[in-house]
Amino acid sequence: MVELVHTLADHVDDVNSCTFSDSLLATCSLDKTIRVYSLNDFSEAPFSPLRGHTYGVHCCCFAPHSPILASCSTDGKTILWSMDNGQVRASFQQPTSSPVRVCKFSPNSLYLASGAADGSVVLWNVPLLKIHRSSSVKDGSLVACTFSPDSKLLVTGSSCGDLTVWDENLRCLHSEKAHDLGVACCDFAAQPIAGAERGMEHFQLASCGQDNEIRLWLISYSGAKGLEMRCTDTLSVHSAPVLACAFSNNGEILVSGSVDKSVIIYKVKSQCIVHILTHHTRYVTACSLAPTYPLLAIGSMDKTVSIWKLRQENDTPVIRRQSKTETHIENWSEDDIKNWLSEEGLSEVEHVFTSNNIDGKELLNLTKESLLHDLKIESLGVRNKILRKIEEIKSKMKSTLTDIPDEFLCPITCEIMKDPVISSDGYSYERSAIENWISTKRTSPMTNLPLENLLLTPNRTLKMALNRWLESQSTTLL
């Protein structure tokens, strides 16, 4: 699913944010700089690094429709940079001079939002380079913000745990507690949800926070009916606060990064974990998916940014439909065995198998000796035919194992998991298998590195996805 293609190690302090345009990657750090790279070969732009902030840079983002990069800092400034030459286009001072923690362009590039430590939020008019509106939340610092795909809604997240929805004139439309201990990040899926009724728009929002959780929200809005916001799912897969989350451009993939140093990639519709990355040695603070390239950027407090190539959707292995004789043989009943014998032209021995109560498990263990001595099948030709058919079944069972999604197989047993848990190395295992492993070892089965702790967290999201997959397989066998 993923392949590490490059590591950027130019920053000398924590990386706080990373963001893609169609052709560039920008990163920013507590070292007060912003660095810009070409996506062609990850070479640094001639004008990089950008130096204009006097304190650490917390966030950076590209304007969708113009070659402009915005950055914000503890110095209370939000700076617009030209991506043609790296020059400062404008410098906006937060009206309260409070440290600016987050900034985000609207999809139409008309507005730039900046959120500060004192809870103030400002909408800047980008073409006019002046303030449009300002407001503030009731409690906490603003640490996250994102615009809806139509640019009409702005959602902000605060350190006290609230998500607040604003219109384009910064009128508060809705506010509610979303995460205990504080929101860390939020992101709208870039495409509206299809099938909306006339005059009503539906959007999907992801948020994450200090409560170790990721939440998916459905926001429905119309000028006449107002706004409704409800949580549709909660993903509890990280073992520590989740600091970053981001949708892919098509909304099908969601990525999250955490204090547990891992990055988890999900399929949104199925909530299936596609991959868990444990590359970084300190907290993962940022993650971003490129709009036009199959690339994922991950920023960390280890001062590096890793770039990963994602397998495109049309390269994803497809689970093919299976016939009844291809899988779940060990679960066959005696009647199933009888039907199979009939299908294979072995009706003459049906009564023998029935009288000896042969089921699926016993069928797979039959040998030439047991056929002759236990089942008393005298004909050598019939015995050989039965053994050939059994070998065909075993061969098909092995081939169908490659059709099982890798994330459903325990790395230790290579069998489908029944009770998946996440270890401190970021990988999921069958509970009994990893418990047996750590009873004698204190290292990761996957990396061979020492485990930070022996805590095992139930992977409920993976278990739900696994159960859905197993149900679908059962359906195809009927």
Image (cartoon, helix red, strand yellow):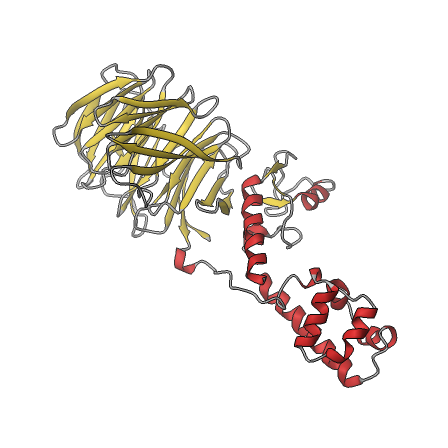
Q: Residue furthest left?
A: 128
Residue at x-position 65% and y-position 42%: 443
Number of marks present in the image shown: 0
Name the image quarter holding residue 454: top right
Residue 31, placed above or below residue 36: above
Residue at x-position 33% and y-position 43%: 193
Name the image quarter holding residue 239: top right
Answer yes or no: is residue 285 visible.
no
Question: In the image, is 337 to the left or to the right of 82?
Answer: right
Instruction: Give the quadrant of the C terminus.
Output: bottom right
Percent coordinates x, y for residue 455 in the rendering: 64, 34
Residue 407, placed above or below residue 304: below
Q: Nearer the viewer, residue 313 or 337?
A: 337
Answer yes or no: is residue 183 visible.
yes
Percent coordinates x, y for residue 388 in the rendering: 70, 78
Question: In the image, is 70 to the left or to the right of 367?
Answer: left
Percent coordinates x, y for residue 127 in the rendering: 13, 32
Percent coordinates x, y for residue 151 in the rendering: 24, 35
Name the image quarter holding residue 405: bottom right
Residue 465, placed above or below residue 18: below
Q: Nearer the viewer, residue 24 or 49?
A: 24
